[in-house]
Amino acid sequence: MRRLGVVLALIVALPGVALAQMDSREGIALQNQILQLRQEIEALRRGGVAVAPTPSRPSSGGGGSSEIVQSLLDRVQRMEEEVRAIRGRAEQAEFAQRQLRERVEKLEGDVDFRLQQVEGQRGGGTPAVPPRGAPPPPPPVAPPSQPAANAPRTPQQALAAGQAALGRREFQAAEAAAREVIASRDAPRQVDAQILLGDALMGRRDFSAAAIAYDDARRRSPQGSRAPEATVGIANAFIGLNNNRDACTLLNELRSASPNLAGAVAERATDARRRAQCR
């Protein structure tokens, strides 16, 4: 188990190192461009003489200054585009890292659960078989001193409490209820719990984690009745991450797969397409 934990930890750490290297290289390049741009602007302030953008066209008089200013504006625009591209790649890398971490944690939990089952089977003895003709033993009766109020709530009750907390915009309580149902491993309610978790995380503006929760819900039941709702949730999370392109791709796929989509989910999909400016 210790060796498994070390390997899983290394897997989680690798995307973060790659992201840091990418930010370092591209950040240094942008910093050098910004420094050069500042030097040229200071030269313009001192006397209107600056390094010409193209050596073949000398800068003289007002026309030269106008060309220099236009060249600087073009460079600023290009740098802004590069910054947006870097930010988008960084957010996608962060999303991939968090998704990998969630899956590794889930895998580790599954391994621990299976090991506990194996150890329980090894430690438990064979149940005693009653002699032939003997009446069956009576069913166990709970002691009367145990109050019913101490019994843990069922996954269905936890889901209902989480939905009520979500309606009151108590996102932390809704998230806790969703994770309680997920930890219970109640298969029929896992999709509902994952969507509730995504809604709660969206309310807390944790868009990366919300996208992972919605994606888990869709993967558990890709043809289920709540799969379109999970897809719209992923798209909204991408919009929150300023990744409109991938959001529109998901919404276009949803429109092709479910052309007769109606109701509240269809309205949410239409609103998401409008906010992402999908064509």
Image (cartoon, grey):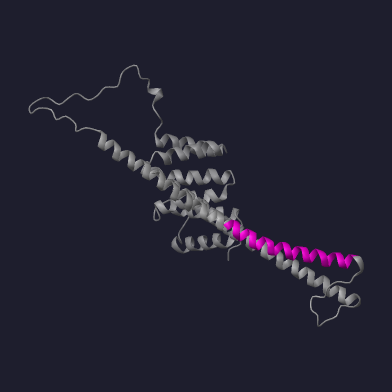
Residue 164 is situated, as x and y percent measured from the top left of the image, at 51, 36
- Please tell me in which quadrant of the rendered image residue 167 appears: top right
43 in magenta: yes
Magenta extent: 19-45
> Does residue 263 appear in this view?
no
Q: In the figure, 143 relative to 215: above or below?
A: above
96 in magenta: no
> In front here: 104 or 262?
104
Residue that protrudes farthest toward the left in the picture? 133
Residue that protrudes farthest toward the front in the picture? 3
- Please tell me in which quadrant of the rendered image residue 91 appears: bottom right
Q: Is residue 32 left or right of residue 140?
A: right
> In front here: 158 or 114?
114
Task: Point out the image quarter for the N terminus.
Answer: top left
Mark count: 0
Q: In the figure, 242 relative to 132: above or below?
A: below
Q: Is residue 42 left or right of residue 91?
A: right
The residue lying at 26 percent from left, 34 percent from top is: 123
> In front here: 222 or 77?
77
Q: In the figure, 9 relative to 255: above or below?
A: above
> Does residue 5 appear in this view?
yes
The residue lying at 60 percent from left, 60 percent from top is: 22
Residue 241 is situated, as x and y percent measured from the top left of the image, at 60, 54
Main SS of residues in magenta: helix
Residue 58 is situated, as x and y percent measured from the top left of the image, at 85, 80
Residue that protrudes farthest toward the top in the picture? 145
Task: Point out the image quarter for the C terminus.
Answer: bottom right
Residue 35 is situated, as x and y percent measured from the top left of the image, at 77, 63
